[in-house]
Amino acid sequence: MKRRTTCMKFALIIAVSSVILISYANAGTGDDNDATSPEVGVEWVTEYSFPHSPLPNSDDSAKAFYNGLGNAGWTRRFDKGNGDTKEAHFEYNGQDSTYIDGVDIAWYQGHGTKSRLELSTYWKWVGFSNEIEWGDHDLEWIALHSCHSTEEPSNFKGSHYGLNGVHLICGFKTAALNCVDGGNFANRLLNGEKVRHAWRHAIDDTHGSGYTVRIIGENSACGNDHIWGEGSVIADPTVDSGYYMWTYSCSD
C-alpha cells in the first residue's frame, strides 16, 4: 500500500526562463573547506494559529535531514525552530552569513507562498524578491519544504537576486504535504543521487498525484550537482538575471 508520504512516477517538464540579460557577479564561497568540512543547517516551524494550520511534522522532518547528514560527517551548524526561527537568519541585511548563507546546504520546513516564507501566522515572513541574496557567502543548495515555494522562479531574480550564487533551490510548484521527508532526502543525497533527483524522489515517496516539485538553478549545469563528497559539484556559477528550472509531477 502506498504511503501518503510518497510518489512513483514523474512527468518531467523542463523549462528555461527568459534570456540572460546581464552579468551580475561571480559568487564566492564563505569558506575554503566545502568539500572537506561541509556544513548543514535547518529551520522549521510547527506552531501556527488560525487561519494557518499547525504543521506537526516540520521539526521531525528537518531534524531527520540535519542528523542524516550530521551522522555522515557533516558539521551541524544550527537547528532553529518556532520562536527561534528568525527572519534575519534568511535575509541579506540580517544574519544570513551566519545562518542560511553560512552553510553548504540548508532546509526550511513551514508555511510559505510563491512570494515568501511565512515563519509565523501574522508577523514574521521572508520575501523572495527583495529580502534574500543566497549564495554570495557559502550556500550551495537549499530545500524549501513549503507550499508554492518555487512556483514563481522570477521572484528569485527580483530587486535583489535571491538566486545569488546558490546552485539550486528545491521546492514546490504546488501545495505540499507536511510529511517527514528530510531523512529520505538526506539518504538519497548520501547515496550519490544528484541534488535535483534526490529532491524529486524523496517528495515522490510521500506525495501523490496533484503535487509538483520545482527546482531552480542559476543555469542548467547546476542540475548536475551532487552534494560534497558524493559526486561532482560545479564551480560557483556566474550570477545574472537568468535562471533554469526543472519541474516534476508526482503520481500515485
Image (spheres, rainbow, N blue to C red):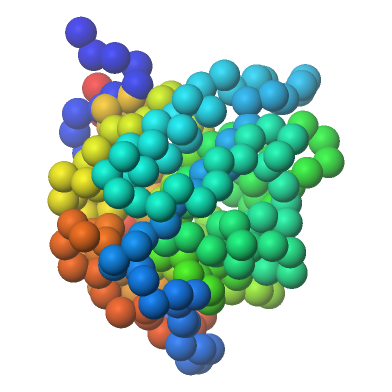
Which quadrant of the rendered structure holds the C terminus? top left
| Coordinates of residue 16 in the picture (x, y in percent) | 35, 68
Q: Is 53 situated above or below 219?
A: above
Q: Is residue 153 visible?
A: yes
Measuring from the top left, give residue 4's x and y in whole percent.
34, 16
- In percent of width and height, residue 24 lies at 53, 89
Q: Position of residue 250 (x, y in %)?
A: 29, 33
- Above/below status of 70 relative to 203: below
> Which residue is pictured at 21% across the width and 60% down the height?
229
Quadrant for the N terminus in the image: top left
Q: Nearer the viewer, residue 196 or 243?
A: 196
How many numbered circles are shown?
Answer: 0
- Seen at 19% across and 33% down, the residue is 9
Residue drawn at (83%, 41%), measured in percent from left and top? 123
Q: Residue furthest right?
A: 123
In this rendering, the answer to whether 29 lies above or below 217 is below
Name the image quarter holding residue 227.
bottom left
Is residue 84 left or right of 107 when viewed as pictured?
right
Name which residue lies at 74% across and 64% down. 94
Q: Is residue 248 visible?
A: no
Side of 118 where 225 appears, left or right: left
Looking at the image, the residue that sits furthest to the top is 1
Q: Nearer the viewer, residue 95 or 1?
A: 95
The residue nearer to you, when weighing 183 against 12, is 183
* Residue 166 position (above or below residue 143): below
